[in-house]
Amino acid sequence: MKKKKVFIACDTNNIKVIRNIISKTNNSELDIGYKFGLEFFFSKHGRKFISRLRNQKIFLDLKLNDIPNTCVSAIKSLKDLKNINYLTVHISGGYKMLKAVKKESKKINKKMKILGVSILTSLNNDSVRKIGHTRPVKDLVRKQAAIAKAAGLNGIVCSGHEAKLIKNICKNMEIVTPGIRLKGDSVSDQKRVMTPKEAFANGSNAIVIGRSITSGNIKNNIQKLIKSL
């Protein structure tokens, strides 16, 4: 059976904590990778630490969102990080920006996959109405998925609630799902959450999970995750 792909969210700027997370989550039963966001990447030694990681799947969650030229310049600035496997960009930046990012990424790192971020899992229908959208989340994500596909992105980041909806749109694209919690865990600042088993059942190819694994006994939490699948 193919191993489930799981990205552990390393949401801290403490390198000692990151090392502990990596050492205690590596196992042979899951296809494990590590997600680094803005907090760690922009910390004093974060970028250097990432550049020195070897034999790990690295998910750089920068969520680029700007005019095409600025995002292309940002991609160029990552040319020294040859070990990055995944990089995120907001689909809301538009087709031209997404297309430009994908084109530039091929020049600097052919193995780096570009994932388009749809509606954040911290938002719900009420949240998107308050920022001016008249369509519900599902409609917005469906439209964004079509844009990501047209721009040639490798995958889309969406909640498990939309994974099943966009699976047919995103054929041959990876569906990566954040907002994952083990059953019974606090949802904290998330709105559209789901358990790992539910997300995979809905068509997600990979999940991103943080606090449910990194808070408390990490080794025990990993075993809970494995048993839940």
Image (cartoon, rainbow, N blue to C red):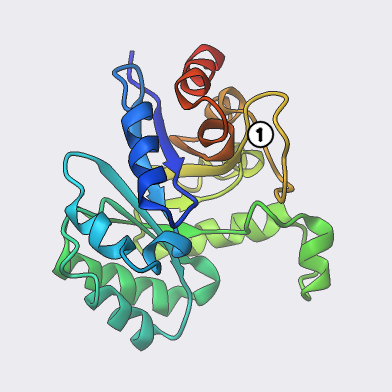
Foreground residue among 53 and 4: 53
Name the residue rendered at 48%, 53% in the picture: 12
Give the amino acid at mark 1. Answer: Met
Q: Position of residue 150 (x, y in %)?
A: 41, 63
Foreground residue among 176 and 27: 27
Name the residue rendered at 32%, 19% in the picture: 2
When asked about the image quadrant of residue 61, the answer is bottom left
When asked about the image quadrant of residue 109, the answer is bottom left
Work out whether residue 173 can be spotted: no
Q: Position of residue 53 (x, y in %)?
A: 21, 48
Secondary structure of residue under mark 1: loop
Work out whether residue 207 can be spotted: yes
Q: Does residue 53 appear left or right of residue 35 in this picture? A: left
Count of numbered labels shown in the rendering: 1
Name the residue rendered at 77%, 54% in the picture: 124
Foreground residue among 7 and 93: 7
What residue is pinned by disc 1?
A: 194
